[in-house]
Amino acid sequence: MAVKIVREKCTGCGLCYESCPNDAIDFDENDIPLIGENCTLCGICIDQCHEGALNLEKETKSVKMNVADYKNVWICVEQHEKTIAKVVFELLGIGRILASKLNGELAAVLLGDEIKDLATKLFHYGADKVYLIDDANLKEYRTIPYTDALEYLVNKYKPEIILFGATKQGRDLAPRLATRLKTGLTADCTGLDIEEGNLVQTRPAYGGNIIATIKTLNSRPQMASVRPKVFQIPEIDAARKGQLVQEKLELHETDKWTRVIEVVREAKKTANLEDAQIIVSGGRGLGKPENFKLIEQFANCLNACVGASRVVVDAGWIPHYHQVGQTGKTVQPKLYIACGISGAIQHLIGMKSSDFIIAINKDPDAPIFKVADIGIVGDLFEIIPEIIKKLSSL
Amino acid sequence: MKIIVCIKQVPESTEAKLDPKTFTIDRSSSKGIINPFDVNAVEEAVRIAEKLENVETIALSMGPPSAEDTLKEALTYGLDAAYLLSDKAFAGADTLATSYTIAKAIDKIGNYDLILCGKQAIDGDTAQVGPGIAENLNLAQATNVQKIDFVDDKTLKVASELEDGYKIIEIKLPAVLTVTKEINIPRIPSFKTARLALKKVIVKWTAQDLENIDKSKIGMDGSPTSVIKVETPKIQKSTIFLKGTPSQIAQDFVQKLKERYLI
């Protein structure tokens, strides 16, 4: 396997060279690119080439399993102390859409201790079936017992697709299970669809600079973790019923490695960014960490939460839980005000779905203005104090 | 005690290097760096080695030949040895094939007690290789670890980050932990450790060097997922610009918020 160059098509424009994240491309004396040994076959250059002069030469893989044996869409339920995590309802929403396209059923897998009652709610939100394992060993989430339980259910019922919330728990469990099942898993998906019977998964990578489309063609189940707050929660139908399938599994051997001593749910040390109605965010344009005080003041006037870009979090100006963006939080407030943030795609991906966006930046070419409803080109140290003054006098 | 730290070379800074007009990545000043979360894993290994007796620390990376520079940099923090897995046969590996290959190398290094990884790499952002290694080696795992305490030489107590807090887990060694930025503040390597690092030889292994490796499980062949398409996202809105003196701008700003009932 290698990236191949069609010499007749290459115009020597250099886009592939510029796009390569691994510095693997060089040129020969005729300005035709040479793919060096640093190539990781990531495929970014292939997309960048306008001429179709690059392609990935693939060998056809042998089909390792009969994919047709696998049917239906599953979602994995995350619950904490018998409360279902919000992302689960979002999974039921997108899961229903995928199941309809495949003419299959939508099932939820519910693991825990004395959690049978939660099944009703899952039916109300669209599950046709709930597979339940109710076991004291599953009371708290632990990687191995949960993996064992899911492995057992998957091998018995053979689902075509399994979706997890891309939460801390989901992203601990899904890769362990996918590795055990030797199947494909795509992390933190922001788009899901069906194409020719396969799950089409889209997700940002390289800090959100690219969006990759990924398929698991020859292995089943097709597994994905799904970013919270991307898909809609379906309407509740309190009359809806479904089938409960209760299973038992001997889990006695599985608690030998880990023991949960304590779970600490911290009182919100900052208001939760994900639930905020208004967010005021600061970036590198603030110049130094002390200037975040200005953002805090601004936020206070609007009863808003404080957000931040990755650069300033990486620089240690403000703790990570303030970070908005692809590796921080995805937010969707009614109003998002970006102050001194240039707007790297990694940031834009986390806030572009906000209802109304205002950007303040001294660089008129800053990418942040491409997503802004209102743009203010100017010095934030002059403008923000004026706004604070006006807001305080209301 | 033997600690193996898994390291990935990633493109430097995934931020602020976009052409604002075309949104393409400007790679003109790019070079590979250690994945930032892996630096915290390296630092943690070095701290454990400073605190306990007879600790051996090893860096392990899979990647193109240029990843050797990243391993050299990791050694400057004071690790004892480094291994690079590099082979055309490994290219195009997804997280399943990558974890399998790295696990085979860890097996070959042998006698390990603790495997440390960064919580995710900033290029792919999958967070899947750590748990994948743990499954391949049939070990306990804890992800998003922000604190490690030793209970005894075979047991750890770790704090693992949650969305709204953390949980304390007791975990038996050997185990795989993935660590967050909160776990420590990495040191600036000293001249002494940097000089010592220069003298160390990085061991290079190809697929041939890994015993009992199943060739159908590595590289692109061993990867159940395929990247079908890669696109640069395009975002564009019609923006209204507020102009005038700061005071006028502030006035208009307040007016706009009022119009939308935001204040």
Image: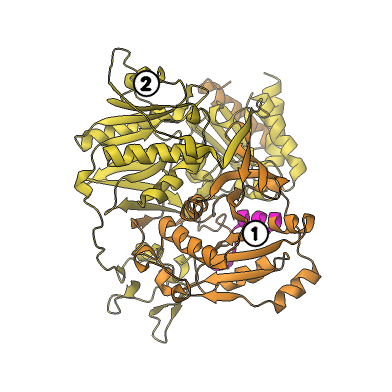
Which amino acid type is shown beneath numbered disc 2?
Ala
Viewer-nearest of discs 1 and 2: 1
Which color scheme is applied?
A: by chain
Q: Tag on residue A323?
A: none
Q: Secondary structure at mark 2?
A: helix
Magenta span: B28-44
Q: Real-space Cα distance between discs 1 and 2?
A: 44 Å
**Marks 1 and 2 belong to one chain:** no
| Residue A352 appears in the rendering | no
Rendered orange, the chain in question is: B
Residue occupied by mark 1: B3
**How many tags in the picture?**
2
Magenta stretch: includes residue B178: no
Residue B52 on image: x %, y %? 77, 55
B151 and B165: which is toward the camera: B151
> The numbered mark 2 sits on a residue in which chain?
A
For the C terminus of chain A, give its image quadrant. Answer: top right
Pointer 1 local density, CA inside 10 Å: few below 14, some 14–19, many at least 20:
many
> The numbered mark 1 sits on a residue in which chain?
B
Which amino acid type is shown beneath numbered disc 1?
Ile
Q: Colour of chain A?
A: yellow
A386 and A249: which is toward the camera: A249
Q: Residue at x 44, y 56 (%)?
A: B95
Q: Residue at x 49, y 33 (%)?
A: A354
Q: Secondary structure at mark 1?
A: strand
| Residue B52 appears in the rendering | yes
Residue occupied by mark 2: A119
